[in-house]
Image (cartoon, rainbow, N blue to C red):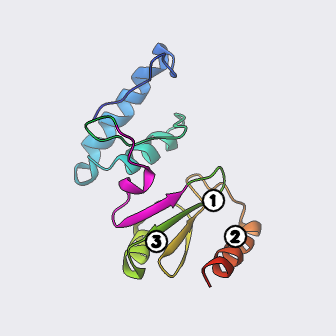
Amino acid sequence: MIVSYGSPYRVVPARQGAYDRAVRTFRREHPEFRKDVDRVVRYVTRRGLPMRAPHVEDSRGERLGRASTIPRALSMAATGTADVIVFSGRAAAQDYLENAGDNAYRYGRAVLSYGVPTRVIPADREIYQRVLRRILG
């Protein structure tokens, strides 16, 4: 796993050590998830280190999309508020819901994720859920 700060740097050199330490700590403390980029991003973010618009790339440097980091996810629409993740089936969506570290809602094989930390206030969640149900039927 490589932590890249971009070129030009998007993280000042004085703060880069904090990111490196957070990633090393996660990988040491959670060996079963050491290659799970999505969990690493959440871990680093929870430590107060901004992770804006993370991207996963293959060995050729091609961006795979965020859904590629989630087991059995087919596609994902990420926004500044709620994200919608579509899974291969209902069981995969339910597995995500039961094991994810975010606040989320499942409808069929789609999951509405409110993020970590939560980006949608509890009073507005029912509106998001109602719209998802209406769209998916």
| Distance between mark 3 and mark 2 Cα atoms | 16 Å
| Distance between mark 2 and mark 1 Cα atoms | 8 Å
Magenta segment boundaries in residue numbering: 62-77
Residue receiving disc 1: 82
Residue 128, numbered label: 2
Measuring from the top left, give residue 94's x and y in whole percent.
43, 77
| Distance between mark 1 and mark 3 Cα atoms | 14 Å
Nearer to us of marks 1 and 3 is 1
| Amino acid type for the residue under numbered disc 2 | Tyr
Dividing the image into 4 quarters, which one contains the C terminus? bottom right
Residue receiving disc 3: 97
Measuring from the top left, give residue 127's x and y in whole percent.
75, 72
- Within 10 Å of disc 1 (Cα), the crowding (few <14, some 14-19, many 20+) is many
Q: Is mark 2 in CB contact (under 8 Å) with mark 1?
A: yes
Query: Considering depth in this image, is 105 or 19 the residue closer to the camera?
Result: 105
Tell which circle, 3 or 2, labels the residue nearer the N-terminal end: 3
| Amino acid type for the residue under numbered disc 3 | Leu
Which element is circle 1 on?
loop
Vertical placement of 8 versus 63: above or below? above
Residue 12, numbered label: none
Query: Considering depth in this image, is 90 or 60 the residue closer to the camera?
Result: 60
